[in-house]
Image: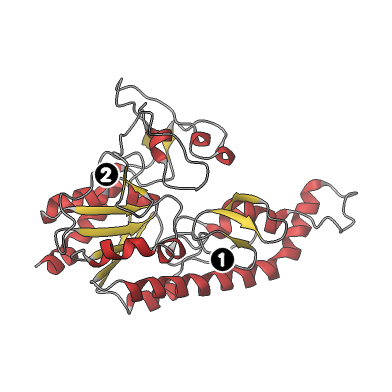
Amino acid sequence: MPTDMRRDASIHLSGYQVRDYDIVDYEMYALGDTGLQFRGPPPPSLERGAYFACLGAAQTFGCFCEQSFPDLLARDLDLPALNLGYGGAGPEFFLGQDSLLPYLNNARFVILQVMSGRSQSNSYYSCNGLEYVTLRDGGQKMGAMAAFRQLLHDPHPRTPLSCLPQRVRARLANLRARPRARALVAEIRAAWIASSLALLDRIEVPVVLLWYSKRPPERADDFSKARRLLGEYPHLITPEILAPLQARTAAYVECVTSRGSPQPLISRFTGQPTTVQTSSDRDDLGGTPWEANKYYPSPEMNEDAAAALAAPCRSLVA
């Protein structure tokens, strides 16, 4: 593995190359003076109008796929893509990256992926728009899923429930936590809308809003378990909070697909099945090695996203 592919522990960045090197070479590169690394290759020219840009998280980045949907769409449009997909990112993250604005506003247009609500700072945790969070009470660091699990299931240490079975204690803790969790979800959604609209205010070129998921936008909140509450990506997002964004963008594209998922993981060196260890991306993600990609969009799903985007993007190019 090239020596420059070391993981930088100081920031949770889209460092999937270390984890996935046996499967895909993402051709990671540093973009100008942004201090950020993105999937390559970059467009041949970054002059105004010489490319389109894609803002999003790992789904835009294209984990485990030789060609992301920005790559496929670029070939269809005969216009290079600047892939700004960043692991774990939400709108709050991009809102804080002023150095990206010239690249966005020099683009012919921008595709903005609908990103996760869990990557939004709130009164329970801060995260700077990424999925790795810091609890405001105590400063503990963890993934957002772990934070929601702790919120919904951990008995309060000052509550005398130690004599009860763990399952009963967890159920009582969940019931007690639900009012706070409902208020927190409402707070996150309001903040996510505010971050998204503020980001749109800074983008001066046409924006295509992309819903890219295995589920349709409609969903009902289930506070019984953290995984059920967050649901499929993009976590916590509903049609009601999409509406203000749709009113501010040039087009809205909905791509609901699970074609090709789960995706077997195949070594590009041997052509044989292989595994990845998620702890090589972040220590707290350790566990059973993945033999298949069940979470990120498959190559076929990337094809579906590119096909769904083709018509509205062609009109913007024209």
Q: Quadrant of residue 210?
A: bottom left
Q: Secondary structure at mark 2?
A: loop
Which residue occupies the extreme front position in the image? 33
Q: Which residue is mark 1?
A: 221
The one nearer the camera, 35 or 265, is: 35
Q: Secondary structure at mark 1?
A: loop
Q: Residue at x 86, y 59 (%)?
A: 159
The one nearer the camera, 26 or 59, is: 26
Q: Which mark is residue 40?
A: 2
Which residue occupies the extreme top position in the image? 270
Is residue 225 at all visible to an observer of this figure? Answer: no
Cα separation, mark 1 vs mark 2, equals 38 Å
> For mark 1, does the 10 Å Cα neighbourhood hold few (<14), some (14 to 19), or many (20 or more) residues?
few
The one nearer the camera, 48 or 108, is: 48
Q: Residue at x 13, y 68 (%)?
A: 315
Is residue 142 at all visible to an observer of this figure? Answer: yes
Left/right placement of residue 73 relative to residue 171 reads: left
Left/right placement of residue 192 relative to residue 244 reads: right
Q: Residue at x 63, y 54 (%)?
A: 147
Q: Which x, y percent locates residue 60? A: 33, 52
Task: Give, as a three-letter code, the residue at label 1.
Answer: Asp
Q: Which mark is residue 13?
A: none
Q: Which x, y percent locates residue 179? A: 69, 70
Task: Give, as a three-letter code, the residue at label 2.
Answer: Gly
Q: Where 211 falls versus 37 (above or below)?
A: below
